[in-house]
Image: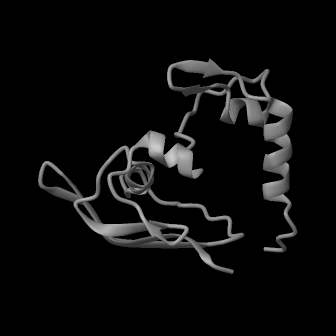
Amino acid sequence: MGEILNMNQIVKKFNGVEVLHNVDLTISEGEVVALCGENGAGKSTLMKILMGIYKQDSGDVYFEGKQLSGQNPQKSLELGIAMIHQELNLVDQLSIAQNLFPVMIISSILILLCFSTIASKITKLLWSGSSR
């Protein structure tokens, strides 16, 4: 299977403090990957670079073989890149899908998502014949 995401030698500094030092991340088609680490390890920072929320100080990001540059969250969403931000406050009365994707705002228009479609897609992704 081909590579979907390739982040090479990513460096990010905040106020002169290097928080990411030459980080590499490669994800191939069909893989499910989890980033784990202590608070402050740089997990969110790396994903915010992928989303275009932050700009890396050096390094390259490739998605589906194309180098991403001038990335912003809108461009990322258009490419199919999305990030579920860490949120500890869940609504007990909602399903997992509803807690993950309660609403999406695109071009200042509020669109309520079809939760049965989302749930179906999540189920297919989680159970897509992977025996790992």
In the image, is residue 84 above or below residue 1? above
Q: Nearer the viewer, residue 31 or 18?
A: 31
Q: Nearer the viewer, residue 117 or 40?
A: 117
Q: Is residue 102 left or right of residue 63?
A: right
In the image, is residue 5 above or below residue 54? below
Position in image of residue 21 (x %, y %)? 27, 69
Q: Residue at x 76, y 36 (%)?
A: 96
Q: Is residue 20 left or right of residue 87?
A: left
Position in image of residue 9 (x %, y %)? 32, 74
Q: Nearer the viewer, residue 49 or 105?
A: 105
Position in image of residue 91 (x %, y %)? 70, 23
Q: Is residue 35 left or right of residue 50?
A: right
Quarter location, residue 1: bottom right
Is residue 81 in sight in this rendering?
Answer: no
Quarter location, residue 88: top right
Quarter location, residue 68: bottom left
